[in-house]
Structures are given as C-alpha cells and as structure tokens.
Amino acid sequence: MSLAVTGATGLVGRFFVEEALARGEPVAVLTRRAPPPGFFSAPVAHRPYTLGERPDLAGHNTVIHCAFAHVPGRYRGGEGDDPEGFARANLDGSVALFQAARACGVQRVLFLSTRAVYGAYPPGTVLTDDMAPRPDTLYGQVKWQAEQALFAMAAPEFVPVSLRATGVYGPAGPGQRHKWADLFDDFRAGRPIAPRRGTELHGADLAEAGRLLRNAPTETVSARAFNLSDILLDRRDLLALLAKAEGLSIPLPAPSDAPVSAMDCNRMQQLGWVPGGLALLRNTLPALR
C-alpha cells in the first residue's frame, strides 16, 4: 500500500511527496506529464492524470489531492475570464477524484483546502477550525464546496480530511521559482514594493501535518477541517533578512498596518503538530536566495 499525490510537481504537492520519500514510503504522483529525471529526491511512480478524470487508485491507502486548475501564479482570481470553467474543472474534477478513491478502496483522502474559505470575516478576526466558512471569492467557494462534497462521503472505511492551509513558502523544485522569487528580484532592482503582511507556513510543516493526519485515529479526523498556519510575516521583515544576508543597502518598504486574521491551529496542535516558526524561515532563506 502506498501514497498517491495529485498535483505533485507543484510547489505544495512536492512537499508531501518529499516527506513520504524521506521515510522510505512508495509514492505515486498523478500529474499530466511525468516529472523530469531528478525532480524528486528518490524514484516515484507516475500515473498520467488530468483533473476531471477518475484514475485507478487501487493499491493506495491514502490520496492527497493538491491538483488545482488556475491561471498561472494566481489562486484567488485564478478563474481569469472563465469563472464557469474554473468552477467546473476544480469542483467537478475534485468530486470525480474523491469518488474514484472511494470506489478503489482508498482508506483516507486528504484535501488541500485554503484559509480563503473564511473569506468574509472582518480583517483581524481570529479564525478557528469550527467557524462557519464565508468565502467571498470563487476560489474560496470552490474549495468549500469540494470540502462539503468530500465530507458527505465519510464512512467507517473512508476517512475524508481537509487541510485549510494559509500561504505556503519554501524552496521550489528543480527548474521552478519559489513564491517570493519575483519579490526578491524587485527588491534587489530597487523597484517599488507595496506594503503587505500575511500568514505563512513552510511546506515542510504542511507535509508534517499531513503525516499526522494520515496516522491519526479515524474518530479524531474524519470529516473535519484543520487550520494550518504558522507565522505572521511583514514584507519589510522578510526583505530585511534578505538585505542582511546579501549585504544590500536598499531602502526597505514601509511596514504594513493592515489588520490580518490569524488562524487558530489548536485542533492540529492537539495532534502533536509544532511548526518551525521564524527560526525555520531564517534557516530556509539561503535556499530561497
């Protein structure tokens, strides 16, 4: 029995694959094209997969669903000028995958959701796992609808779990650019940078949460959503770390005074999850440079 990961060559999906490979677990990646040689740290099985298909998942005890169709580089607003196609591809495609997993005897499905399901709460609200979702973007709506469809399939032999993750940072795969690459380039070039701060989570911590949720007792996780967030990060502070590391004397952007809604991750922490905090960000910076 092994793990299957959709969207495995994306920034987020790759972290789940690498976490499993580090423990010697066999992994199948479900992507449209096979990953290039050396993309992952160890060999993986590849199964051609396009969102909307019903893949054969026999032999896998867990599926982590990360695949998501969107305009490149955008999640919120990722529908571009085709909101109907966006919703159809992602909602119907996700439901088709969930149904295939259940039909093939997969025991547990982890769905990569988002903090965007809470959208309409006022900035500065502490977001808890049990708050009623109030998505105010199509992206958040589609993720919330997919969560509901997945949870409706719950059964003793089929355990659905939702990971409501905040923004994920970390090193990108070979040949890819990490989420802050353009920001770093703009800063080095002295281009104007708008103040901003938000919640962030290292991909390795997200993958560790996935491991804990895969192994947690059924009654603890079935048909439940788990908030996943770590640090509140201002662009000014991030770029200050970069400037110090590279000896740059470029003026820093102004700090942001916008209120940010923190995520209460107590439910996940009760399973023993301890994210790396600012220390992990500092340790990761050399790889991001």
Image (tube, rainbow, N blue to C red):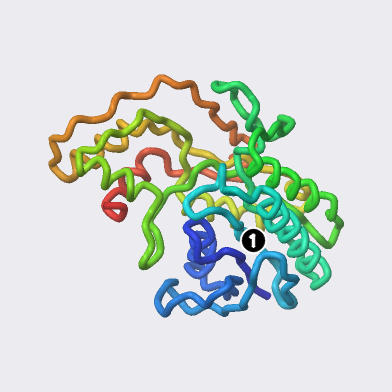
Q: Residue at the location (40% across, 33% down)? A: 233
Left or right: 241 with respect to 62?
A: left
Q: Is residue 91 above or below residue 107?
A: above
Residue 29's place in the image compared with 243, above or below, is: below
Res 137 quadrant in image: top right
157 or 123: nearer the eye? 123
* Residue 235 image position (x, y, % from top left): 34, 34
In percent of width and height, residue 39 lies at 42, 72
Q: Quadrant of residue 153?
A: bottom right
Name the side, left or right, on which 217 lies relative to 235.
right
Residue 49 position within the rendered picture, expressed as x and y whole percent measured from the top left: 64, 73
Q: Nearer the viewer, residue 67 or 211?
A: 67
Which quarter shows the N terminus? Answer: bottom right
What's under tag 1, amino acid-wise?
Answer: Ile
Image point (48%, 47%), residue name: 168
Local packing at callout 1 (Cα closer than 10 Å; few below 14, some 14-19, many 20+) is many
Residue nearer the viewer, 244 or 7: 7
Placement of 179 over or under 123, stated as above or below: below
Q: Residue at x 49, y 55 (%)?
A: 72
Considering the numbered disc 1 on the image, is that residue within a helix, a strand or a loop? Answer: strand
Q: Work out which residue is located at the far front of the displayed protein and give it.
A: 81
- The image position of residue 57, as x and y in percent, is 72, 74
**Residue 231 lies in quadrant:** top left
Lateral position of residue 11 relative to residue 245, left or right:
right
Q: Which residue is mark 1?
A: 64
Q: Residue at x 44, y 77 (%)?
A: 36
Above or below, 193 against 63 in this view is above
